[in-house]
Every structure is written in C-alpha cells, then in structure tokens.
Amino acid sequence: MAVLEAGQSGIANVPVLNLRSDFAGMDDLPAQMAEIGRRARAAARLMALASAQTKDIALRTIAERLRASRETILRENARDVAAAEAAGQSRALIDRLTLDDARLAGMADAVEKIGALADPVGRQLAAIERPNGLLIERVAVPLGVIGVIFESRPNVTADAGALCLKAGNAAILRAGSDSHRSAVAIARAMSEGLVAAGLPADAIQIVPTRDRAAVGAMLAGLDGCIDVIVPRGGRGLVERVQAEARVPVFAHLDGVCHVYVAACADLDMARSLLLNSKLRRTGICGAAETLLVDRACAGTHLVPLVTALLDAGCAVRGDEAVQAADPRVTPASEADWRTEYLDAIISARVVDGLDAAIQHIETHGSHHTDAIVTGDREEATRFLAEVDSAIVTHNASTQFADGGEFGFGAEIGIATGRMHARGPVGVEQLTTFKYRVHGSGQTRP
C-alpha cells in the first residue's frame, strides 16, 4: 500500500489546509488559546471526512516518526526527569515520567496497534424500518475536538493523539509542567506524521505553554471549539476539571483499587495476583491500594500474604488483625482506606465475608477496578455483579485495567462515571452517533 504524499488527504473534494503556523507575536494567552481552538475545529472537520485508509497510513507514519525521533524524545525526557529529581518529586512520579528505549518502542507499537483496529467511524449501530416506509439508521461519528489535560505521563501524548486520530477527531493536548519537554517532542513527531500522510498537522496540537491559565481556557471550551475534556492526573487536577469545566468530562478521581482474598482463594494464586496488582507498577491507576482478607481464610492466608508484601519492599498499614500478623505492619488510619498511594504502600484489613468486602469497597472505593480471588464460582458471580466499579476482575490482576490489555490498542483514560463511556476509553468511546433518515417523499400527518 503506497503512502500518500504530503498534500494528499484521501478526502474527496476537500483541500488539505496548511493549518500550522507559529505563534510569533501572540503574547496574549487567551488569543493564543483561541487560535489553537479554531485550528482544531477546522482540522476536526477534515478529520471527520478522512478515509479509514488515510487514518491508518497516518498512524503507521506517526509510529515511524516516533522511532526516528528517538534521540530527541529521550533527550528532552532526560531534561524533564532531571528537573523533577531536582525538585524533589516522588519516586512514583519520576517512574511515570521516565521514558527509555523500551517504553518509547512500546509507545510507537501502541500507535501501530491503534492503526490496525477496525475503523470506529461510520459503523451502523442500529437500523429501524418504520411502518410508513422510513428507514432510520444510527451511525457512529466522531466527537469533534477533544481536549486532553494530563500531568506526568508523556506517553499520554501519543496514546491520546493516536486514539483521537483513529476516531476521526482533533486533539488539543495540554501536558503538565513535569512532562512538557517530552510531550512537545512527541507531539512534533506526530504532527510530522500527519503531514506526511496528507492530514492537517493541527489535528494533534500541544499547548505550547506551561501557564496554568491555559487549563482554564480549555475548561471554558475555547469559544465552543472543544467538545469534551479528558483529564489524566491526580485528584487535584481532576477535581478542578470537574468543578470548572463547561463542556462534558470523561474522568475518574482516584484509582483506589481493592484485592479481596475470599475464603476459597488458592493461596499461591492470591499471593501472585496480590504482588502483581500492587507492585508491578505502583504509580498507575490500576495498582491495588487495599487488601481485604476474608476472616474464614485469615488463619492460613493472612501471614503469607502480608509477609510477601513486606519482603517485596511494600509498606503495609493494617487493622489490628493485620498488625498482629507481622510486627513490621503499622496501624492504618481511617484516611488510609480512601488513599490512592501510587507508591509501594498498601492498606489491609480482615473482613467478615463477601458482604463485608463489598460494603468496604462501596464505602471506601473509587469505582475504578476491584478484584476477587476465589475458587467459588457463585461467590465470584456475586462479586462481579454487585461491586459497582468500571472494571471488576475474578482471579486476575487489577493491573489489567488498561486499554491495551482490553484489545483497544491504548486508552485515553479510565472513566469511572456512568455517562457515555466507562472503563478504558478507546476509539469506540471517542465517537458519538447521529441518525440518518431515508425516505421516499413521506410527510407527517
């Protein structure tokens, strides 16, 4: 399949606009942000008409440009990491911020995988034939312009941009101060890939300032140019977005994820799943933050599980029963049950059966991801049905809460609300729909 030359969009009868120019002389932030919004809206109109083939060519080309830009991206990321270390940022934040050859290769591979997915645009979601002969179709269409506000994860630049592109949208990306240099370098490579495939460079824009006022401008909607906001970051960012946004929001506040080891849990499986859920990567939203152990198996399971966590370098904060299991356990406060540590720390308590476990999760959880470990199928069925979280797992790590692991290629975030999107937000969730009504002259009496 030949790659389109620059200037060939694959969009019939629609010229490719040169939407990219610098912001020289635009010192006024509101004017700068308004211009970004106008460019994004113009790019979104073209993206909505782009063929599946053109979008897939663009994504493959972007993946190639990311690989070719390896030295630049890693150099800029090293500057971000050095600044974060000098500022005394946490180990967990620095882990989220850091790119290396493997993570950069994974980023490019994820973009290619998104390109290999089925095109979500134009799908017929329903067809209704009315008694008067009207045929009504419900068809998937792009959302339009998606604003993504994120903090320390530079890979969100590539994931979010690629997912928005695949779904026929334009993206305005605002990176946090910690990852700004990395994000700019990644976004530059992505824009080069768009142009090479004949699509507007402004379909993926990075906000070129660390000024926090840019966030406020995005939350206000940029004069109607932004259709939805997706925040990726800590509680402070997400709470601000939810409080101030004047456009719809896909968001979650915290990933307070639980592992419940039920009475019929296999000890070796429980230990393996617990360690993976907590420690594979402590700084991601799918990391387990609370261990619940059923009192019925605490006599055989509690000490081995707590010991495994402590020996692996994880601090444990527990109730009285957990403190009695190992002298290294420190007391848990009431706040611990609601804390997203994003670090090698876990809270733990013994509960009196499935109902108590579900009640604890409902009271203290964040409706993100919760797991049960059990050999009892009926108990697992109840847990999966009654725990009101976006993702619930049976005998599987909470760290599978990831769009790539769900076969979505990547994700723009994990939504824990109930409107439109829930769980990993992939390409299908970045579309909406419209109705097409086909008639033969019908009029309404």
Image: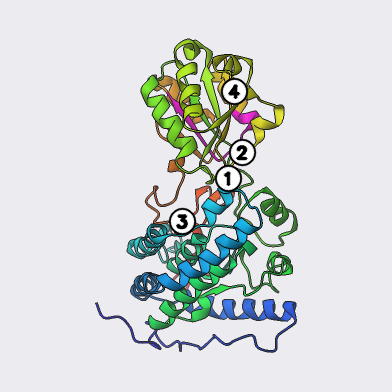
The residue nearer to you, when weighing 264 against 275, is 275
Looking at the rendered structure, the kind of residue marked 3 is Gly
The boundaries of the magenta stretch are 361-373
| Disc nearer the start of the sequence (2/1) | 2
* Image disc number at residue 338: none
Looking at the rendered structure, the kind of residue marked 1 is Thr
Q: Residues within 10 Å of mark 4 (few under 14, many from 20)?
A: many
Residue that numbered label 1 is attached to:
416
Residue that numbered label 2 is attached to:
366
Q: Nearer the viewer, mark 4 or mark 3?
A: 4
Residue at 53%, 33% (x, y): give it.
Answer: 314
Q: Secondary structure at mark 1?
A: loop
Residue at 45%, 75% (x, y): give it.
Answer: 189
Q: Secondary structure at mark 4?
A: loop
Residue that numbered label 4 is attached to:
329
Label 4–label 2 contact, CB within 8 A: no
Give the Cα distance between marks 1 and 3. 14 Å
The residue nearer to you, when weighing 100 against 375, is 100
